[in-house]
Image (tube, rainbow, N blue to C red):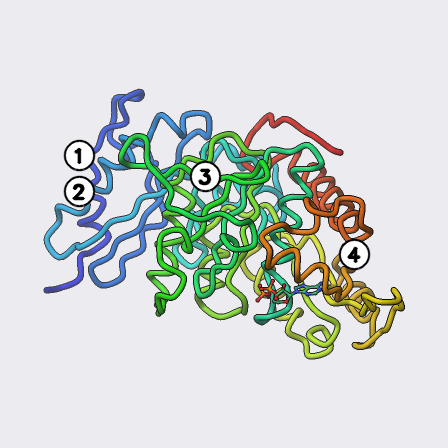
Amino acid sequence: MAQVTEAQVLDALRAVLDPDRGADVVGLGMISGVVIKDAMVQFAIEVDPARGPALEPLRRAAEEAVERLPGVTSATAVLTAHREAARQEGPHRHAAGRAGGQQQGGQQQGSRPLVPGVGAIIAVASGKGGVGKSTTAANLALALRVNGLRVGLLDADIYGPSVPRMLAISGKPTSKDGRTLEPMENYGIAVMSMGFLVAEDTPMIWRGPMVQSALQQMLRDVHWGELDVLVVDMPPGTGDAQLTMAQQVPLAGAVIVSTPQDIALLDARKGLNMFRRVDVPVLGIIENMSYFCCPNCGHRTEIFSHGGARQEAERLGTEFLGEIPLDIAIRETSDEGQPIVVSRPDSPHAEAYRSIAARIWEKLSKDAGGGPQRPAPRIVVS
Ligand code: ADP
């Protein structure tokens, strides 16, 4: 069967009315970023962020209208910020501004859906696996919480979800309304991970589109509630799947985690470039496993030419957010499901995570006027 055309999609959407404005969504100019790939259709509905949560029925009606077209097996509609929300923001400002400004340009950039109630969404990413990205994401999320913010952690590392184990959360999320999942919770933060939905020993072979829709669902079909910040633990690497995810999420910024040798190997730079390509501000680099702390005598050894990240960050024009040593206590506490920020709050490592978290929040508040998705957000700087 021939692939459906954009004109056919728009025709189908003309049957969908905006209940408050009494006209159809196409006529009102609310549809943008139509992407058609074989039998799958994606598009964005631009709305005023204040109306976001109330428009879920409209979003579903739009999806259903497109799914009724012959040759379409699935339609995904995302609500995005109203174009007026772009106001005077430049390209490196907040997500709502970018979404509004770029949909004109079309499909390459994609649209960035809003997640109702969630202030800033930040990605924790790395150029490659095994550098301690998940450990850093979990400790940072907890440190943001300790600093007084309402925090969520989305484990988007769907190739190897480790957040359930690190935060000692097991069981399956439930749903109160039969449609949205309630996030799991521990240590005062809301958590969602593919690991809750799929058994740990299940081999997962995710292809690009599946990765994308899993992330979309974990953002959109989870009842996150009111959050100041949602930390997204990204899958490692800088391939297509990661790039798509970076495009699909309304990110306020990204933090790159790297080890000193990873910096030397330029993997961190790839991560940085990936976010720049999709116009997400890079908040800075964290050097993990920066130096070795002997558990017996406390002696500090610089195994991997410590300090490279600071110089590299400078050269790349991004901020060096801080360093976390290679310390068995960090690994053990994570493995035990009690990350060091909560289990040893007085340790220098917990202090390091807290101060990095404070700096990240300070930057977000400054860059985005307190939160990237809300016009008048609550600003909490610890
Ligand atoms: P990634 O998400 O980048 O694949 P993880 O966070 O899963 O990496 O970390 C890989 C391993 O390294 C884990 O066993 C973790 O406990 C350990 N680890 C991470 N950071 C540190 C650190 N600073 N000191 C000691 N061990 C660490």
Q: Is mark 1 within 8 Å of ligand 1?
A: no
Label 2–label 1 contact, CB within 8 A: yes
Q: Which amino acid, mark 4?
A: Gly
- For label 3, count other residues whose C-alpha is less than 10 Å away and answer few (under 14), some (14-19) or many (20+): many
Query: Real-space Cα distance between discs 2 and 4?
Result: 52 Å
Badge 2 or badge 4: first in the primary sequence: 2
Q: Amino acid at mark 3?
A: Leu
Indicate the secondary structure of the residue bearing disc 4.
strand
Tag on residue 12? Answer: 2
Who comes first in sequence, dot 2 or dot 3? 2
Q: Residue at x 39, y 49 (%)?
A: 216
Which of 8 and 360 lies nearest the eye of the viewer? 360
- Spatial CA distance of label 1 from label 3 is 24 Å
Evaluate if marks 4 and 1 touch, with contact meaning CB atoms under 8 Å apart.
no
Structural crowding at the residue carrying mark 2, measured as other residues with C-alpha within 10 Å and reported as few (<14), some (14–19) or many (≥20): some
How far across and how far down the image is residue 322, in percent?
78, 56
Q: Is residue 61 above or below residue 130?
A: above
Q: Which residue is mark 3?
A: 114
Separation (CA) of disc 2 from disc 1: 6 Å
